[in-house]
Image (cartoon, grey):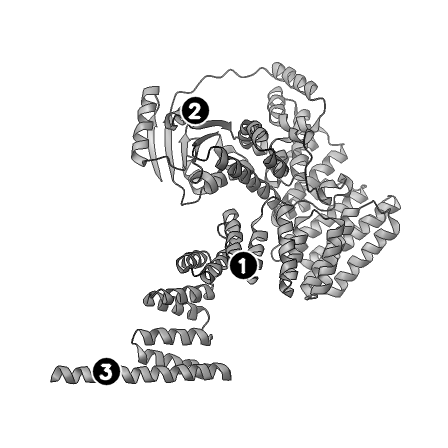
Amino acid sequence: RGALDTGLASSRKDSLMAIAMTAQYSGLPDFFILEASEESPRRDLLARHARSIAGPATRIFLANTAFEAGGPWAGVNTLFASIFPEIESERPDLVEKHIVELVYVLPRLRQRYTVKHRNLTDLAPIEERSRFFAADRAYRVLQGLIDLIQKWKSVKDADIPWVIVCDGYDKASMMSRFFFKELARRLGQRLHITLVLGVAPEMSPKIQAFFPSHLTGVALKLTAPAEPREPMDPAEAEQRALSLEAGIAGDRIEIQLNLPELLRLWNVAGRKDKLLEYRHFGLETYNTLGLYEDAQYYGRGLLDLALEITPSDERMIWSIIVKIMMCHMGLGNAEAGIEFAEGPALKNMPASRHLWRAQFFYLVAMFYARYSKPRNLPRGEEYLELALQELDKADIPDHLRHFETVFNRNGLAMIRSFEKKFDQAIDLCKTGLARLNQHLPADKHVLHRSILIYNIAQVYSSMGATEEAIAYYSEAIAMDPNYSEYYNERGSLYMHQGRMSDALRDYLQATELSSPYYEVFTNLGQCYRKMGQMEAAVGAYTRSLELEPSHTLALLGRAQANEALGRREEAVHDYTAAIERDPAQWDSFACRGVLYYELGRLEESLRDLEAATLLNPDNADLQENRAILLGDLGRHAEAIELLQGALMRTSSEAERKSLNDRLACISVEQSKAKSAAATIDQLQQA
């Protein structure tokens, strides 16, 4: 990585700089970082730079990635809006395959396309949504979008370079920033994609650190005079905002698409009431979609604004409190969630709203019992009891009381499971399910009934009761057949039982029902390897590592599959990567040591086996293998001493026999070596 300082006083100097840079780096780096003040004509400078490094066939995409300009998918939506018409025309199969991901960045597509594989969490009415999406769902969507580009570009114009300009990258949302980083990591070199990132002065080191170290980056400091900008008149901003609202006519998709502009205009107009309305919309919308980090952007300071603008609007205040807590929960930020809940949230919870207070206390219980590290189970249970007390005071319909009580006791079942009181946990779930079945119509709270069944499956799995767990997983799947994780988890139970074809079927189904996630491909690799299908195993592990390069289990699995295929060098490479990521894995050193031995690299083999022995000193096999190596290296005395020490430490008759046999062999080798050395000495003396 390098850094250059340059002033752009003229287009000629810009061109000369680009020519010199191209000569210096003999080909484009993976990304450029161009520092310039926002008050300068930075976007024009970025575009000019993109053109200067582009060849005649290069496609250039210009995007503003700043959150305030385009929201959570700023820049990503611009890129896909540019290429989607071509994809739709040329590869409608890819649109159908990736519509789940596309509607995230191009929401209007919901009006034309049916989203496939919607599960009960997607379909449940808002008032019945008792499960929220995990934070990694959004990152799966992001990887699915990159898959789409790969499939389309690799056929359409694999050799045509792309230069993507991302202005305001230092102010991008987490989703946008992560998308372009992953695009560069996964496809940059393979499909000739170069990023040009516009950032504020002095931001280059932070941005460079965000990218993987193996990618090449060049930082440039651009100097250009500030451009005078006339501030918009507040009255004009209000008129434009009102006109925009009139065109949107309350359509939620259109509000989502125009949210950044609405917030900008109402901010200039000084209308705090409108800022409250639309920031609440952003908090609510992106929380529901599972983009918790970006939803927090809209929620920052929102409770204080609501208390200032509409202190009597209890529903608005309650909604903000819950959504902010859900953001912390989705991100696993227990400490921040508890601080918010027990501070400003509790202070502003209406005392007379007993149902809301019951739900609030339940959420606090989850922070303590589920997300805190270490978990505080007693404190969590205290809050569940407080929630029940508030529920007893609430004037609510019977069906709602039944549901809320069952929901609360499901939280207690989780605590009992953590306490390893498995029978109590199962009884709480089964009792709750029976109560819902008895008192609620069959079409109400179907999602939570499926969750109770799934929770029973999880508890049975924790107990080691595999057959019972599989039965309940199967029942949950029957109710919610599009929930990918159910298949992934049941597949692992099948694999544990040795039912490999059943496991394979479940893993493959899990990959079909979701945007890609590395865990299921690792499991698929494990399944193929145990079935003896090593080439398929390597493919599955490779797919997992494409999504998450640091996943140690996938590296180890691929190493073992390559080893079985006789690809020793490839296996050594993967064992080395696994050791770099987790140097406490003794078996990684041992396996690599064996491969080094087979490759004739005896000194390296010995070093690995010594490292493995330090991590697992009581392993007799390691001691024996080290002795073999020492013998091969002619260090017989050390080998004999090692085996004698191992014999003193083991009580296993089988291990003792093996060690004694090896000791005898090496003693014979030592005698032969001594005899040969003596003969040589005699000959030399003669």
- Residues tagged 1 and 3 counted as in contact (Cβ below 8 A): no
Q: Secondary structure at mark 3?
A: helix
Label 2 vs label 3: CA separation?
77 Å
- Residues tagged 2 and 3 counted as in contact (Cβ below 8 A): no
Asked whether residue 400 is in view, the answer is yes
Name the residue type under label 3: Ala
Q: Is residue 108 left or right of residue 637?
A: right
Q: Residue at x 77, y 39 (%)?
A: 125
Front residue of this view, candidates 495 and 402: 495
Q: Secondary structure at mark 2?
A: helix
Label 2 vs label 1: CA separation?
50 Å
Q: Earlier in the sequence, mark 2 or mark 3?
A: 2
| Mark 2 vs mark 1: in front | 1
Q: Which residue is mark 3?
A: 676
How many residues crowd mark 1 within 10 Å: few (<14), some (14–19), many (20+)? some
Q: Which residue is mark 1?
A: 533
Q: Which residue is mark 2?
A: 47
Q: Residue at x 57, y 41 (%)?
A: 144
Front residue of this view, candidates 4 and 139: 139
- Residue 614 image position (x, y, % from top left): 42, 70
Q: Secondary structure at mark 1?
A: loop
| Mark 2 vs mark 3: in front | 3
